[in-house]
Structures are given as structure tokens and as C-alpha cells.
Image (cartoon, rainbow, N blue to C red):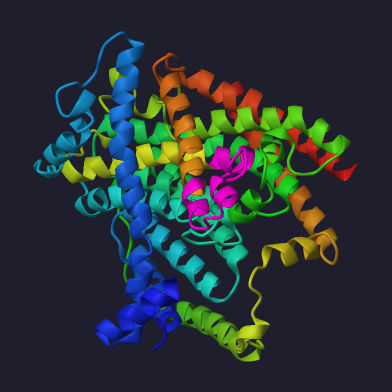
């Protein structure tokens, strides 16, 4: 598909280099469009979920049950004045939101949405996803420091400490999963869980025999650890200390307004889907349908990728819903509790899990 | 000029440009942030060399680890932002000799290395081969590095503990 685009553009522009560069740029457009549409939907969903959990109705005025509310909000947001205070470090202040957003966008290019559409089928897959969260940390620190505001700086330092700490259990569980699947390529991980749902990671993977049944409880432990630690990495409640409104105004994005604030916002919500996507890829079969494909049944080939896209997004959305559910159910943890959960519970459990899964795989 | 040439020059420009900014900046926090671009540019060059695993490790270790640590250090150390950073020419002769030796080493390495220039020779992925080599040919070095890191970890923990008991 990519070569096809390059040829068309070469004919149009008469310059192969320019055409190729343009192709690479254009190939991120579907992912960017997905993020924007997802965020518009997810913000509305978040408000509706929170409202219904608190026995309210939430936005009801704009469109059916307020579905167009976020679009209206977004239009309002992008026409706001872009405020830069005198004491801000201008260059860093302007770069930070883009650094955070681009790092998040880059991780999305590695997700296998269907068997035919993967932005970049890199062999280092999940390793790169983990590595790119370093860009997010740097961006958040940059935002907090450039804002020249003590609340922003506190928020960004908290965020960085939190993300760096919770990266350890995440990496340990991911290591366990790499051992189980024998690859870091997210597309191959998904391929390994093809056909029915009992081949999914949470049910011990595609292998048969005793090993599969022994793996099930440890896969479940791995799933819980990965879920908690990725939730903490995305700075969501109950781990939203970096922007705890009652203490820090709004954390590292206090000084931001207009389009730059919305970039932070986009990155945060995109991260929610990213968590869901990673959990789905490792434990719930990625884009694989649980019962086989309707397209194969009636012999329509093009229907299969559409179904895969449907399954991937709906499984991902389920975890987005779970994280919203948690957000409106649980109170925020304290800083010391946050660090205790990570260092005293998650990391030792993740280590034991790694060891036991390794032993099972050897046998 | 193919697309790879273009990407190479882009990353080379990022690396060199930001490295120059790191040393010429007046503000130490800014220098640390410019270093981010330098690390990123270097990892891009690794990708172009066909070393995908090394490139990601570069991002993981340098941007995700060392740079963040550096920023924490710079931001949390009091008065460091007000420190007058000395710039300008000083000790010119030793500097020229040092850089000359380094340049010579790099150039000789560039000439001596047998670069893989045909498409068939360049491995598509490297992580599998690196993993296999680490537990076969280089297993002793690998284990020694593990012990070294463990010692560093224990040392760091004991130093942090001693501070608290005072």
C-alpha cells in the first residue's frame, strides 16, 4: 500500500524523494485521526460514566445525550488565547506539549490494529513502546520546569518519579510476556493467539498440555500487575497525584492554555487507549476475534480486517471503560502509598512471577 | 539522494546541532534538555546502521534513564540554576591534543571497519542474534556485568541509608 502511494505521489510531484517523505508523513494520518476521534468519544464517555456513577445525567444539551459536547468544547478550546507568561522559558514551554504528544503518537504507530494495518511492524515493538515513555517523562519535566510555577514543578516531578518507578514492574511483566511468546514484535504476539479465545494469553497461550494450565494463574497475576502499573504510568486516578487538583491546581499543565493544553489532554486520553491496547495484545488476543470470523464464514475476504479492527477497538475500549470506572470509584492514594505499592508489592511479585513463568516454560 | 540519505542528514544535523547547543547554552537545565535531542539523533543513526535493538536501548537507557536522572539532579540541587557557567577558550593546547587523538581514533575505526553495504548482508533484526550471543560466546562478560550492576545497586542503597541515620 505504501509503495502504491509513493508511485501516485511521484507522478503528481515529479520528485521521488519528496514523494517518499510525504508518504511517510501521510502514513501517520490514520493513527492521528484515530487518536483524535477516540479522544472526542472518550471525553464524552468519561463525563457520561462519571455522571451516571454519581446519579447525574452529565452533558445532555449538545446532540443526542450530549454526544457533540466534546466537539463544541474542542472548538472552544482551539480558539482560546495562547497565554505565555513573561517568566516562562519560552522555547521549552512551547516544545513540551509537542514532545509529550509526539512520543505518545509514536507508540501508537507500533500497535497492530488489524492483520493488514500496522503503522510500523518493528521487531523491537514493545521495547520501543516502553522506551518512548521516556520521551513523555522528559516532556512533562520540561513543561513543569518551563512553566516557572512551583505547582507545575511539583506536579511534573511527581509525574516523573511515578512513571519512572512504575516502569520497573511494567518492564518485568513485559519481560515475562516476551519469554512466553518468544518475540517482542506486537504483530507476532497477536499472531500467536489466533483462532479461538482459549488461545489467548490470559488462558495460557496457544500451547497445549500441562504447561498451559500451569501458566493460567501466573498469567492472571501478570495481567493484574501490568494493569496497575500501566494505569499508574498514565497518571490516572487512583494514581493521579501529578495533577491532584486539591493540592497542585492542575499539576504540570497549570500554565498551559488553548491548543497546547489540548495536546496534553490528547496525550493523556491516548495513553488510556494505549494501556488497553497493550493489555489486549498480551492477554486478550489483540485483534483476534474470540469465535472466528463472520467474513470467513460467508467467504467475504475484505470483511475480516474490518472485524479485526472492530474487535481490537472494542476490547481496548473495554479497558478504557474499566479505567474510568476505577477513576470514579476509588480515592486517590497518598505519595508514600504510591511508592509502597510499587516497590514493596508490585516489583517483588513481578520478579517471582517472572521466575515461575520461566521455570514453567523450561519444563 | 534517496530517502535514507535524507533521514541520515536529518539525524546527523539534529545530533551535531543539539550537541553544539548543549555546550554553548548558558542555562544548565536547557543544556540537559538539548541533550535529549542529541541522544535521540544518535539513536536514529543506530537505526540507519541496522542496529534496531541498540537504537531502542539508547532511547531507553539514555533518554528514559540517564537524562531523567540528570534533570532530577539539576532541578533539585539548590542554586544550580544561578551558577555562572564558564565558557570560552581555556587550555587550548591540551584540548586540541585530546580532540585530535579522539578524532584519529574515530577516523581509523571508520576506515578499518568492514561496512556492510549490500542489502543482503544487513540483518533485518538484531535482537534475536544479540540475545543468542549474550548467552553463548559472551556469557562470562554478561554475568560479570550483572554482578557489577548488582554491586552498584547495593552501594547506592547503602549510601542512601547512611544519609538517613545521621
Residue A207 in the image: x percent, y percent? Answer: 80, 44
Q: Is residue A286 magenta?
A: yes
Q: Is residue A319 visible?
A: yes
Q: Extreme bottom residue here? A: B111
Q: Is residue B57 above or below residue A16?
A: above
Q: Is residue A132 left or right of residue A358?
A: left
Q: Quadrant of residue A160?
A: top left
Q: Is residue A207 above or below residue A57?
A: below
Residue A329 in the image: x percent, y percent? Answer: 43, 14
How many callouts does the rendering have? Answer: 0
Q: Is residue A109 magenta?
A: no
Q: Residue at x 24, y 39 (%)?
A: A148
- Closer to us: A227 or A232: A227
Q: Is residue B22 left or right of residue A352?
A: left
Residue A330 in the image: x percent, y percent? Answer: 45, 14
- Closer to us: A21 or A285: A285
Q: Residue at x 40, y 35 (%)?
A: A157
* Rendered-image quadrant of the N terminus of chain A: bottom left
- Closer to us: A83 or A188: A188
Magenta range: A278-307
Q: Residue at x 56, y 59 (%)?
A: B56
Q: Is residue B76 left or right of residue B130?
A: left
Q: Residue at x 71, y 40 (%)?
A: A199
Q: Extreme right residue here? A: A363
Residue B57 in the image: x percent, y percent? Answer: 59, 58
* Rendered-image quadrant of the C terminus of chain A: top right
Q: Is residue A13 above or below residue A26?
A: below
Q: Is residue A144 visible?
A: no
- Closer to us: A143 or A218: A218
Amino acid at each position: 500500500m505504501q509503495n502504491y502511494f509513493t508511485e501516485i505521489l511521484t507522478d503528481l510531484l515529479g520528485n521521488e524523494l519528496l514523494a517518499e517523505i510525504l508518504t511517510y508523513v501521510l502514513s501517520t494520518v490514520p493513527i492521528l485521526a484515530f487518536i483524535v476521534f477516540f479522544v472526542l468519544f472518550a471525553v464524552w464517555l468519561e463525563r457520561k460514566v462519571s455522571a451516571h456513577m454519581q446519579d447525574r445525567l452529565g452533558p445532555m444539551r449538545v446532540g443526542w445525550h450530549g454526544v457533540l459536547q466534546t466537539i463544541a468544547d474542542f472548538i472552544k478550546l482551539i480558539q482560546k488565547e495562547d497565554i505565555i507568561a513573561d517568566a516562562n522559558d519560552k522555547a521549552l514551554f512551547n516544545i513540551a506539549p509537542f514532545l509529550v504528544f509526539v512520543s505518545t503518537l509514536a507508540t501508537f504507530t507500533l500497535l497492530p490494529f488489524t492483520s493488514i494495518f500496522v503503522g510500523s511492524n518493528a521487531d523491537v515493538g514493545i521495547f520501543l513502546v516502553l522506551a518512548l515513555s521516556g520521551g513523555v517523562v522528559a516532556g512533562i519535566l520540561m513543561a513543569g520546569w518551563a512553566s516557572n510555577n512551583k505547582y507545575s514543578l511539583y506536579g511534573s516531578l511527581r509525574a516523573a518519579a511515578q512513571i519512572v518507578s512504575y516502569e520497573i514492574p511494567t518492564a518485568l511483566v513485559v519481560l515475562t510476556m516476551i519469554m512466553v511468546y518468544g518475540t517482542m514484535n506486537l504483530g507476532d504476539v497477536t499472531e500467536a493467539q489466533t483462532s479461538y479465545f482459549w488461545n489467548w494469553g490470559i488462558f495460557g497461550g496457544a500451547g497445549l498440555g500441562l504447561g498451559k494450565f500451569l501458566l493460567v494463574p501466573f498469567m492472571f497475576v501478570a495481567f493484574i500487575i501490568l494493569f496497575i502499573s500501566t494505569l499508574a504510568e498514565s497518571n490516572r486516578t487512583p494514581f493521579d497525584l501529578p495533577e491532584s487538583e486539591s493540592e497542585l491546581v492542575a499539576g504540570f499543565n497549570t500554565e498551559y492554555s488553548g491548543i497546547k493544553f489540548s495536546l496534553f489532554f490528547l496525550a493523556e486520553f491516548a495513553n488510556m487507549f494505549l494501556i488497553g491496547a497493550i493489555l489486549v495484545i498480551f492477554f486478550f488476543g489483540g485483534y483476534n476475534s474470540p469465535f472466528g470470523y463472520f467474513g470467513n464464514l460467508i467467504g467475504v475476504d475484505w470483511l475480516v480486517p474490518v472485524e479485526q479492527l472492530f474487535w481490537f477497538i472494542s476490547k481496548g475500549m473495554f479497558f478504557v471503560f474499566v479505567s474510568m470506572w476505577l477513576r470514579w470509584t476509588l480515592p486517590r492514594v497518598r505519595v508514600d502509598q504510591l511508592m509502597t505499592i510499587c516497590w514493596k508489592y508490585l516489583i517483588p511479585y513481578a520478579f517471582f512471577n517472572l521466575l515461575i513463568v520461566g521455570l514453567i516454560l523450561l519444563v | 539522494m534517496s530517502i535514507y540519505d535524507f533521514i541520515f542528514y536529518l539525524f546527523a544535523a539534529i545530533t551535531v546541532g543539539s550537541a553544539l547547543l548543549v555546550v554553548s547554552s548558558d542555562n544548565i537545565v536547557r543544556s540537559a534538555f538539548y541533550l535529549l535531542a542529541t541522544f535521540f539523533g544518535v539513536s536514529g543513526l543506530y537505526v540507519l546502521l541496522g542496529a534496531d535493538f541498540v537504537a531502542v536501548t539508547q532511547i531507553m537507557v539514555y533518554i528514559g534513564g540517564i537524562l531523567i536522572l540528570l534533570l532530577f539532579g539539576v532541578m533539585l540541587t539548590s542554586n544550580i540554576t544561578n551558577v555562572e557557567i564558564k565558557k570560552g577558550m581555556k587550555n587550548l593546547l591540551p584540548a586540541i591534543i585530546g580532540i585530535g587523538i579522539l578524532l584519529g581514533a574515530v577516523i581509523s575505526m571508520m576506515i578499518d571497519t568492514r561496512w556492510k553495504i549490500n542489502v543482503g548482508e544487513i540483518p533485518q533484526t538484531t535482537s534475536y542474534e544479540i540475545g543468542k550471543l549474550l548467552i553463548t560466546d559472551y556469557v562470562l562478560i554478561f554475568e560479570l556485568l550483572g554482578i557489577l550492576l548488582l554491586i552498584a545497586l547495593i552501594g547506592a542503597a547503602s549510601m542512601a541509608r547512611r544519609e538517613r541515620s545521621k
